[in-house]
Each structure stands twice: as structure tokens, then as C-alpha cells.
Image (tube, helix red, strand yellow):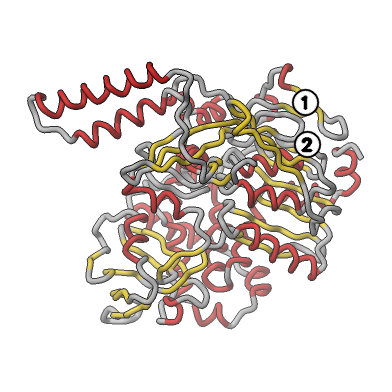
Amino acid sequence: MSAPFFAAPDTGRPAASGWRRGWWRQAVMLLLATSCGFLVANNPFRPSANNPDATARGYLRFKEILSYIDRDYADSVDTEQLADYAVVQMLEKLDPHSVYIPARDREKADSFLQSDFDGVGIEFNLFRDTMTVVAPLSGGPAEQAGILPGDQVLSVANKRVSGARLSTLRLTELLRGPRGSNVVLEIRRRGLARPLILSVPRSRIPNSSVDAAYLVDEQTGYIKVSRFASNTYDEFKTALVDLRRQGLTRLVLDLRGNPGGYLDRATRLADEFIGGSRKIVYTDGKGDQYDSQTYARVAGDFEEGALVVLVDEGSASAAEVVAGALQDHDRAIIVGRRTFGKGLVQQPMALSDGGELRLTIARYYTPVGRSIQKPYGANYAEYSQELTGRSARGELASADSIHFAKELRFRTDHGRVVYGGGGIMPDVFVARDTLANSAYFTRLMSHGVPRAFALTFYQTHKAELEGLRFEQFHATFRITDAQLVSLAAQAAQDGVTTDVAAMRRCAPLLRNQLKAFIARSAFGTVAYYTVLREQDAELQRALHAVGDSTAQLALLGK
């Protein structure tokens, strides 16, 4: 019997932590796709008998050299650090996704796929090196303690954090702690002369991976899944059943920027859409021990009805398995851009010092036999720049710039041609938004200026906003030219040089983003995504596809 598959982030290579879908997405997408590949758990180490002598000689050589360095090198050295470096370099010779995780980093590496954690429940943003509350989580300790959107956190547990140049990860670590323990926060709030001192108890905080689930109209549902964590399937199932109760008959499943995660959660989600006992994914490794096949096995809640799946270059690993299975079986229209192309399976191997080796032991394939893993050769540097290369070749702007080898051609259940060898190519291509990725817009977002501006607006106009229903706000609220000028001035103070021409070009997108941030603070997450939809070309195309039943049936060959 094959072992269960799952995935978790790794920190085996020196890399900064980042958002799943930030404005600096090129670097982040590689990091997340690398860290969220599939893993196989609880399989004990069994040394190979194929080449034991060469392995022994290599081990002795490494041990001997490290001993000489420690004993005789002219300067003092950190031999543990040297050993870590050597291991990382050795693994890079294998493939881009085999990694070593030191013991000190294992907890951080696993936290991405946790369904909950112990903390205070604050969503925050860093602006001018000050931790600013975007929103306290509903029902969480921070909300119950009276923390409001726009509050600035000056210190955590008597440790100064404002102006201390701490990373988002470090701030998160300070807020988290054992359930039942208290953390003292010093809060600066607009309109108050003195900071507030609040003692907030830590408790269990849900870490949702279904970011949004709502009806766009009376019959069209939208569900966004940001990763495949331990509780993703249960969250998705609950959301789908609820939307079905509300009248859902067609669905847009958003997997953009989803870097993967637990494979069994992903295949269970796919099973909700695929009828019968059709294959969802299979793996092939060295020998039979790592070979497996996964089939649909339950009667899903949405095996009939129009389905569109949104993907992009940030969709990787488990997300690609879902998209690939649905495309191979002609169950869904795939909309967006070619996915990342991560199709290597990792197995975690516990090391004696508490660290972990995550070693590639197989490749995974879609039901018709497509390998989604893109080429990587022996050059990790080139692999890490592959997404940048797509942009340079024009692939993110035009489907005509994408070329597949004829020998990698496959056919779906209904005879449509699809290709393997490097990600899932969508049925409907949507070019990347050049405004969203323009240098000026990217700098504004990375500095946190629009979110800070929106929070200030919310605080100033809180009473007026609370007197509105979201429908009224959505229909009548507009960001003015004067407010954009004010935002540009605020950005200039934070080091983002004003570019009048660039501001003019991205003004529609920026107005929409500001309105969405204000809606998030005043009306919640669904309001945020509802506003964003207006400037989301990929989602608009998906909604058109899911609503055009004639075009959908023709495209899927039915």
C-alpha cells in the first residue's frame, strides 16, 4: 500500500518568506512552488544496496575534509554552517525541489499548511516600518480586546516593534504563543493622545485556506482556494454545500497563486467534480514502492453543472493536479495562463539532529499521462528565473508565444489536444495585466501605500461608512482625482518617486484597489473580492465562460 502524500513549506535553501500572490510575484511564485510540493510521509529510511561502497567512500571523504577544516584551518569556522551549505549545494545538483530543512526551521516550514494556530488574530500590514492592523479576525481575541482596523502596534510584550525594522515573519512570531498566555500590546490609535495598553489572551485561531466563497449572481458561485492545507477540503465542502443551498448551478474555482499543499486534500476536492471512478493523478518513481494511482471514489456535490477553473503562473503542484485532472476529463474550462510546472514528489526523511530531508522520489502525471514538471537540467539559477523568462518571451501577454513539443501531445476524454512537459496550458488564455505589474504600481503596493491610505480613509469616515449598506457603497463610492494626488504625495514621502504618466495609466486599477481595501475594513472579505472583480480581467473572462453554456459545451467537445 502506498504511503499518503502531502506537502509542506521548506526552508532548505536561503530564501526570504513572501506572499502567495504579491505584487513582486516572480520571486514569490518560485519560493512557494518550491516549498509546497508534494511529500510522502511516514516512510522509514531504507539504504540502497545498489552502490554501498561508493556511498561509503563519499561519506568518509566528506567527514575527513570537515575534520581537517575544523582542526587545522587558519581561522575559526562554524562547521555546522559549512555542512549545511554543502548539503544544500549537493541537493541542488539533483533537482530544484529536493531540500534540507534545519531543525530550527522545521516549525516555520510546517506552519503554512496548518489549519489553525495559537495567537491573537490580527491581519496586519507594515507601512513605514510600523505594524498597522488591517483587520482583527472576527471573533478572535484581538477583536474582543477592542483592537480596530488602522490601529498601530508600537510594542509587543514590551518589545519595541515600531521602527525596529522587523520582518513580517518576526512580528508574527512575537504575536503567536501558547494558548491561554497573554501578550501585552501597546497601541496607537487615531484621535487618542496617549497609546493604549492592552493585554490580549492568545487562543486558537483558524487559518483558513478558502479565502472567499459567495454567489456572484443568483446561480454563479465563486470559491477561491489559496493553498491545500490540512483543513482545506472541509472548508471547501462546507462552502460548496452552502452555495448550493443558495442556488448555485455553475461555479468558478479560483486557484490563481495557489502553490499546492497536501495532495490528498486536492484529490478529494477534485473528486467533488469528477464522476464515476475515473483517474485523478498517478505517480511514477524508481521501482514500484513510490508508484501510486488515485481515482475518484465518492459521489461529489458538483459532478454536473458548468465549471471554470482559474489558474496562472503561480498555480503549482497540487493546484496543477486539480486543473490537469479536470481538463483531461473535459469536466471544466481552464482559464488564465500556463501554470508553474511543478510535478516532482518529495518524501520527508527525519534526521537525527531534528532536521529534515525532503527528497524527490517520483514524478506525478495527469490522468492521460502528462508530466507537468517543466525542464530543469542542472542549473538551479536558470530554473529560478524561468518565470522571468516567460515574461521576456512574451508568453504572459500572448498565447502565440507558447510552444509545446509535438511529441508531448495528448488527448482528453473527448479528443481535445493538450500538452505535457511544463505546466497546464489553459483552454482560454488571458494576458497578464500590465498595469498591475507596472513598476510604479508595484512600488506603491510593495510599500503598502494604498492599504495605509485606505485605512486612514476608513478611520476618518468610519461613522459614514457604518451608516451604509455595502450595496449602497458599491454603487456610489468613487475615489477622486484629488485623493489619487494625495496618495501619490504620501507615497513620495515614503520614497516612491511620483510618476504622473504612470499614475494616469494605472489610475482605474488603483481606484479599484483603494475602494476594495476600504470595503474590506468596512464590510468584510466578500465585499473586498466583490469590488476587486470589476478590474479582474481573468475573473471576468471566467464568468463569461461559465455563463455561456453553448460555448462551454462546444469547447469541451460535448
Is 26 drawn above or below residue 57 in the view shown?
Answer: below
- Per the model, the C-alpha gap separating discs 2 and 1 is 9 Å
Q: Position of residue 134 (x, y in %)?
A: 45, 66
Is 517 drawn above or below residue 549 in the view shown?
Answer: below
Q: Position of residue 111 (x, y in %)?
A: 44, 55
Circles 2 and 1, Cβ within 8 Å, touching? The answer is: yes
At label 1, which amino acid type do we have?
Phe
Is 54 drawn above or below residue 161 in the view shown?
Answer: above
What's the residue at 56%, 28% (across, down)? 390
Q: Position of residue 242 (x, y in %)?
A: 74, 69
At label 2, which amino acid type do we have?
Asp
Mark positioned earlier in the residue sequence (2 or 1): 2
What's the residue at 34%, 63% (across, down)? 131
Res 551 quadrant in image? top right
Is 538 drawn above or below residue 465 in the view shown?
Answer: above
Give the numbered dot on residue 410. 1
Q: Relative to residue 387, is residue 539 drawn left or right? A: right
Q: Circle 1 sits in a helix, a strand or a loop, which is it? A: strand
Q: Position of residue 397 (x, y in %)?
A: 63, 33
What's the residue at 59%, 64% (across, down)? 528
